[in-house]
Amino acid sequence: MTSQPASPTGTPDRPTVVVELAGSRARPESLTRRTLRRFLRNRLAIVGVIGLATMILLVVFASQIERYPYEQMDLRAAKSPPGADHWFGTDRTGRDIWSRTIHGGRVSLSVAAAATLLSTVIGMTLGATAGYYGGKADWIISRFTDIVLTLPPIVIMLTLASFLPRSLVTLIVVIGGLSWPGTVRLVRGQFLSLREQEFVTAARCLGLSHRRIIFVHIMPNVIAPLVAMVSFTVGNAILTEAGLSFLGLGVAPPTPSWGNMLEAARNLQILRELPWMWIPPSIFTVLTVLFVNFIGDGLRDAADPTMVL
């Protein structure tokens, strides 16, 4: 045995007893807190948040920071290169490219946000119904989703957009109405796994309604992967709106959007001689989608318990 060290008075020191008070133990970290902590440690995700927030502020306060009204024409300043008066130059009718770019972002981001909301609501409703109830409901929804996935989305979008009036509502309905199959599959898979868990069985034994089990007990566990999916849907919606507007099926001029500003690049003369007409909306589109993807990657990694950050 090891002897106790002697105290200055010659008597051995008594062993130190550590008493842990009840309730003093650190409480386990909640899922939301852990996800947030892991997300904040992802540098690219933080860059994405800062960049996207900057873009949103630019488009929200576009009327306050514009140099000239976006629809104002000044033929004396037509085709002017970037300078002190017109930071991004002017187009062939003298309209300020800076003003049109930030106002165009308002249209593009609004369409992307509304279309993503529409597709998410449809996907969550169908996916939760199929995954929770199973049986015939699951079979019908799954087969319908498979049929939609086999259709070429860009062809369907072009067909619908060509028959419907050119407006923001049309873009939102067309993009959001064809972007939900991925969300359905994600939510359905999560519900199929979670409905067999013990906490769901316990809720059923307590006599809770199906609605309460779905929205209170299962849905919170689907939010983390769903948020990551939504962020990627936003990026795809921005690109889809730009593509439709580039083909002349987006919002009608003179209302600007990044897509219909890029439509000017189809003119070979503008492409070569007036690059400032299409480079700014191109850069803004690429950066916004990049920032959204950074956020999506960060949310996906933060919500994945197998990832080490």
Image (cartoon, rainbow, N blue to C red):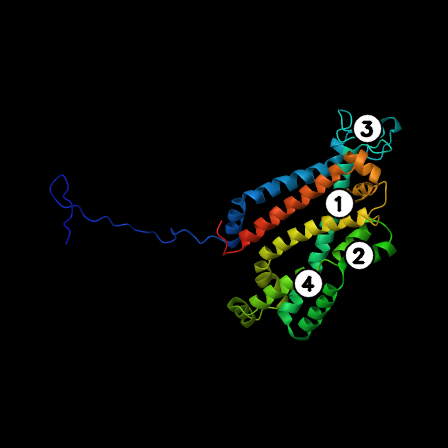
232 or 269, which lies in front?
269
Tag 2: amino acid: Met
Residue 214, picture quadrant: bottom right
User: Can you give x and y, in whole percent of width and height, for residue 215 in the image?
Assistant: 62, 62
Asked whether residue 213 is in view, the answer is no
Of pointers 2 and 4, the one earlier in the residue sequence: 4
- Near mark 4 (Cα within 10 A), the count class, few <14, some 14-19 or many ≥20, is some
Of pointers 3 and 2, the one earlier in the residue sequence: 3
- Report the residue marked by disc 3: 80
Residue 167 falls left or right of residue 34: right
Q: Which mark is residue 125?
A: 4
Asked whether the residues under the numbered discs 3 and 2 touch, taking CB atoms below 8 Å apart as contact, a structural biologist would say no
Mark 4 to mark 1 CA distance (whole Å): 26 Å
- Report the residue marked by disc 1: 108
Q: Is residue 209 above or below residue 263?
A: below
Asked whether the residues under the numbered discs 4 and 3 touch, taking CB atoms below 8 Å apart as contact, a structural biologist would say no
The extreme bottom residue here reads 136
Depth-wise, is mark 3 or mark 2 nearer the camera?
3
Q: Residue at x 71, y 70 (%)?
A: 143
Tag 1: amino acid: Ser
Disc 4 is placed on an element classified as helix
Residue 39 falls left or right of residue 57: left
Residue 266, picture quadrant: top right
Mark 1 to mark 2 CA distance (whole Å): 16 Å
- Report the residue marked by disc 2: 157
Asked whether the residues under the numbered discs 2 and 4 touch, taking CB atoms below 8 Å apart as contact, a structural biologist would say no
Disc 2 is placed on an element classified as helix
